[in-house]
Image (cartoon, rainbow, N blue to C red):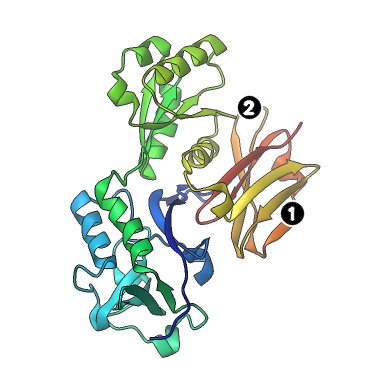
Amino acid sequence: MSAEYATFGLAPAMRAGGILANGDYQVHRDFLDFIVDGRPLLFQLSDLDAVSPLASDVPPAIFTAQVRCLLLEADAPLDGGRYVIYGCPECESIECGAVTALIERDGDDYVWRDFAWQTGERADVERNGYHGTGPFRFHGPEYRSALNSLLDGDAGSRRRVLLIGARGALLAKPAAALRAVGIGADVARDAAEVAGVAAGELRTYGAVVFGRAVPEVERAAVRESFRGAGVDVAHVEGLAPIVPLLVAQIEHALDRSPQELRRLTRLVAADDEAGVEITSTCRVRLTAYRLDRLSRTHAHDVFDGTLEPGHHRIPLAARAVKGESFIVARTSGSVLVAAMPH
């Protein structure tokens, strides 16, 4: 079986959740992506909104079964000996569409080939195949080492968020929004309440969010509580009382993927335009949020299109960024936030 050798690895990735400008919710998913020849395989296929079977929120027994399948220690789940490489982030149904492939042993090597988009019991490789992708031949020891490491440790991630603020009623809405997109959220009034939480409990948090009214002395005390528990937690300074904006900030803070493996790497906003940097072709959506003089929130979709790798300058309508305003840029796997200078 002929195929060029490729390197194999795994890296944290996420399907960015959040609240879209039209009010729709998008579920947050953490997963491990397959890194082939130094690049996420997901980027090499197309701009898919999909996750690998190695998702952190699946039950441990199912996660282990997925790893065993990739090691060919269990039967293929689909007809024709095919395996799911990427599936729908919202459900597990093949009808939603999935990227599947054949995984075979050749001596001590593992070969992935015949990638295809599949929506039924059988894949039509001729019609729906990714003909420019693969086959990939992986050295057996490298392949097995990467996957077996998942069976020896905790593949999950901390996806809970702690929101700090004296006015708990104001934090109820962002906490509910986070739970709706699949991120656990708790509320604490002050540093004293955080100090009373057990160290083991603090270690379950991936981010701490401070409201704009929380004084610096309180913030410092909260940070000290987490340091005392030995937790390296992300700290988020809430930009404004805009729920979708705050959720986007938290999504960015929870992103554990290596910077060099992200599609969306930079966002700046100034002079009625946004600057974005993209590392691979993908769909990018820009949303502007602003507060008017009565502290009411206004949202505007300002761009939704496919961008090529590189730097892009996108004009922003003046009415969308009038006054105190912010820009949220998102791809399927990344979210960035920037404040418009007054």
**Of 128 and 262, the residue lying toward us:** 262
Label 1 packing within 10 angstroms: few (<14), some (14-19), many (20+) = some
Residue 310: which quarter of the image?
Answer: bottom right
Q: Earlier in the sequence, mark 2 or mark 1?
A: 2
Mark 2 or 1, which is nearer the eye? 1
- On the image, the x and y values in percent for residue 8 come to 43, 63
Q: Which amino acid, mark 2?
A: Leu
Please report the residue visible at 56 percent of the width from the left and 21 percent of the height from the top: 212
Q: State whether residue 13 is above or below residue 69.
A: above
Total number of numbered discs in the rendering: 2
Please report the residue visible at 47 percent of the width from the left and 50 percent of the height from the top: 16
Quadrant of the image for the N terminus?
bottom left
Quadrant of the image for the C terminus?
top right
Disc 2 marks which residue?
Answer: 294
Label 2 packing within 10 angstroms: few (<14), some (14-19), many (20+) = few
- On the image, the x and y values in percent for residue 7 come to 46, 65
Residue 88 visible here: no
Instruction: Please state if 157 lies on the left or on the right of 219 as rendered.
Output: left
- On the image, the x and y values in percent for residue 114 come to 40, 82
Tell which residue pokes out farthest to the bottom in this image: 126
Q: Which amino acid, mark 1?
A: Ile
Residue 138 visible here: yes
**Of 319 and 289, the residue lying toward us:** 289
Disc 1 marks which residue?
Answer: 314
Whole-angstrom CA distance, mark 2 to mark 1, is: 28 Å
